[in-house]
Amino acid sequence: DSPDDVTLVMADSFPQTHPLALGGTNEMINTLQSDEAKALGIDLEYYANGQLGDQKDMVSILRSGVADIAPVSPAYVGPELQLSNIGDLPGYVGNAHAGASAIMDLLDDDGILYRTEWKPRGIRALWAASIPHYEAMTANIQVTEPSDMAGATIRSTGGAADRAVDFVGAAGVSMPLGEMYEAISRGTVDGTLASPVSVASYRLGEVLDYSTNGARLGAFTVTYAVSIDTWDQLNDQQREFITQASATAQKGAATQVEKAQIKGLNQMKDEGVEFHDVTDEERGMWNKMVEPVIDGWSHDLEERGLPAAEVVEDYETAIARYDNDEPTAE
Amino acid sequence: MPDFTSVFRPLTQLPGYRSGEAPLPLRRVQQTITMISFLISAVILTVMSVLTGIEVFMRYFFDRPLGWNVNFTEQYLMVGLAFFGVTVAYRLAGHVAVASIYDRLPDRTKKLVQLLSQAVIITAVLPVLVNGAVAAGISFGLNETPAVGGSELPLNYGLWKSLVPIGSALFIATVLIDFVRELCSDWSGPITDVTRPNRQTETEGGAL
Amino acid sequence: MTIALILLLLLVLIVIGVPVSFAILATGVVGLLSLGGFELLNGVSQFAPASAVMSYSLSAAPLFIFMANLVLKSGLVDNLFTAARVIVGRAKGGTGVASVAAGAIFAAVSGSSTASAATLGQTSTVKMIDEGYAPKTASGLVAVVGTLAAMIPPSIILVFYAVTADIGVGDVLIAGIIPGLIIATVLIVTMYITGLSNSSAMPGGVPTTMREKFGAAVNALPVLALFAVVIGLVFFGIATPTESAAIGCIAAFILLCIRRKASLENLVAAFVETTKTSAMILAIIMGAEIFGHFLVETRVAPNLVDWMSGLPISPFAVMLIISLFYLILGFFLDQIAILALTVPVVLPLVEQFGYDPVWFGIFIVLLAEIGLVTPPMGLNAFVVARSAGRPVGEVFLGAVPYLVAMLIVAFVFLVWPEIVLWFPTYMK
Ligand code: NA
Ligand code: NA
């Protein structure tokens, strides 16, 4: 045993069949458990399926040293990482690659999110995944413009997504996707803002009738984060190795997410969902909805003394650096 | 004006609790803690039923679910019931325990086992108290508050997290008083008998 | 090795009388310390205790307990046994049948089998003995009938199982109806079979007129109506179990007011009982969460799954071993504690064998409930013994034929899981 030998404890909450696991997490686990890792004194203990804790506990789990690496989703830890919700706001993320890269720019050592929210909690991001393409998916009512959702009961993922639901005059309910099939078929809920990736895996297309395509109503951001205490204990080679593995994971996850996106879209079509493609003329109408949502978000957080305006500015600069086009389906 | 002594009899006449032997101030502290914990628990149960009822009503008749009630129930009501109720259950010997072997022990041994049992409870809950306080402190310190307009009430997370150390502290104080009383009393046998649900506390609510 | 020592510690603490919840918590604390020192213990203690109870689905448990306590205070269940006895009439073994029927109706509003045993022990056991039933039959039967409350919804332990197994609470609750009715029927049949050898020990009931029977049925109506509302809301998908439990509490409170029993004294008593029982359960859940973190980090669950599925025996044989394991645990441990400690470890294995998690919940609750009527921890037996003024040994002995019958039912469920699973498929 050399003094630099380290066993990293990794918590996970996503199933190992999730696109971000297929492209990213699984790859990272393999790399960190490889002989090459062992030669550098790195070993990894992996605990799947929320065994070490719920999504909402992940910041605590890292900060308190229960795990060294864990998935942190700002949407699930809203009060702890309020500004980091920026990546989930509507109107921004066009594809998974751009979404992941842009949020990571704000999470590096001089990034504003790292400085204001992550460092004080003793955590830093290794890599990110963004699941974009949130669309308005409904049963019975077809949504072709934001106002169509007024008065409807729409499931929202919590966090920043609540704002979009609220803004169009819909009633937001928070419930796990797993309960949506039942809720839609009973009529308890009229629809959801969600991405085809997740909707397809719950076969919600069977009970949904309509969906927008290209409305860009938000995203879901996950980062795999490491505790700063652990990070500081690693030697330079170990850090370099993990950084490399993380970059590979991020790229792989984004590729798989986009693949799953197209697959999910097609599955929903097969299940009988009618898609309304957002046209160039209609885009302005959706953007009009998005602007006040972002402004409201920024305003509320500024009132709490958080530098939200700066985060918006930095994030818009970051996302402009990448190819943010929507992938063309089919 | 209801007769409060008889109304609260279930709380004041505790199984196996020989109050006459306890010094008055300690006894009063224990009774006060139990009463406060009980009143908070009763309020929680009332709010839990009514709030959930309102949620169904609003959703079914007005298509306007409250939304915030889910997190409120989880964070404040469930955590509150767990951490304040624990003292009530302890004082009513409501925590299930195996008494068959304890009952057959000689009195002197019973006393040692009783002291050990109380010490185990205090030691086991202490980390929950301390770290619960740390967690609440972090939430207050970093101003961890849900966003306005979301599905949660914009109250600092430190508020509900505080229920953990406060409830634990009241509970530890209650058990500690029993422990100290036991320690300072005659060593020929135990004076507290708090964990004997098999024979003493199987009333309507009983175990499962 | 660590895990064996830790389990031994758990056993010792429980045996010397440390409350089960704190024994589990203390053992979990020691386990975490041994694995990762204070860093791990402090880390887990920061979020795990609260996280364990922060579940909206789980809030159905205190609400159902509250509902049952309000119904008890309304006095509506006091006469259930008398009403059932009038309805059954003069049939041979009528009072025994009435005890089971009253137990089943009581179960429809109460989620606690011990509460059921306490209520029935005072009335039906005493009456049966008066009428000439063998005392051991009378007390043994009633102690077993109590366990129906854990199977027929609402059931606290089934709510807890569903939350632990991360499956729909409604599915599990609805799945309990048919097994509950099957068990009730089997108990009656068993009573007749045991009565064959000595028919003088099973006298006829009292003859009653149709008018009397009708009047008695009306008495049981409010309780059945409450059951219909609470379970109907879940079955037809109008409300979640948590929501229907809350509606049940409000309805029970209205019943209390209508019957002019909503005195401060009754309310305080209902609050006290509810707080006591709920907090006891929540304490076990919190202790088990800490202990569970220790178990996870020892990797005992995946190792056990690998080992068991690699054994050269059939899945059915493994299931028999698991059944035996639950049966034995039921003798010594509280039912909630059994589920909290074992379900995360055992369920993955059972699912790997292709068994449905809803079925497994019904199955292990049936097995664990048997422990409530067996020595040394058989709480129901103690309760009936005390409330009917009979020796505990007599209750244990009298329960034996019914326990054998329940074991046969469990075996049938194991061979034909569809018996448990067909009904929930009609749920909306
Ligand atoms: Na469809
Ligand atoms: Na029941």
Image: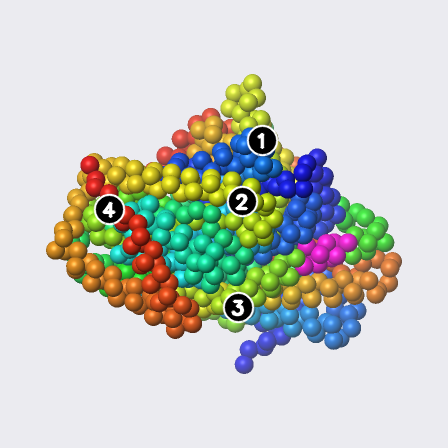
In three-dimensional space, the C-alpha distance between marks 2 and 4, rounded to whole angstroms, equals 34 Å
Label 3 crowd bin: few (<14), some (14–19), many (20+), radius 10 Å:
some
Pointers 1 and 2 in contact (C-beta within 8 Å): no
Pointers 4 and 1 in contact (C-beta within 8 Å): no
A136 or C370: nearer the eye?
A136
Pointers 4 and 3 in contact (C-beta within 8 Å): no
Q: Is residue C242 visible?
A: no
Q: Is residue C76 left or right of residue B87?
A: left
In three-dimensional space, the C-alpha distance between marks 3 and 2, rounded to whole angstroms, equals 33 Å
Residue C304's disc is 1
- Residue C173 sits in quarter: top left
Instruction: Tell me the element at label 1.
Output: helix
Residue receiving disc 3: B140
Q: Earlier in the sequence, mark 2 or mark 4?
A: 2
A269 or C338: nearer the eye?
A269
In three-dimensional space, the C-alpha distance between marks 4 and 3, rounded to whole angstroms, equals 41 Å
Instruction: Tell me the element at label 4.
Output: loop
Residue receiving disc 4: A326
Whether callout 2 and callout 4 share a subunit is answered yes
Pointers 2 and 4 in contact (C-beta within 8 Å): no
Residue receiving disc 2: A239
Query: What kind of residue is marked 4?
Result: Glu
Q: Nearer the viewer, mark 1 or mark 3?
A: 3
- Residue B108 sits in quarter: bottom right
Image x and y of residue C105, in percent = 45, 48
Q: Is residue C102 left or right of residue C279?
A: left
Q: Is residue B155 visible?
A: yes
What residue lies at 68% left-to-right and 36% top-to-bottom? Answer: A1
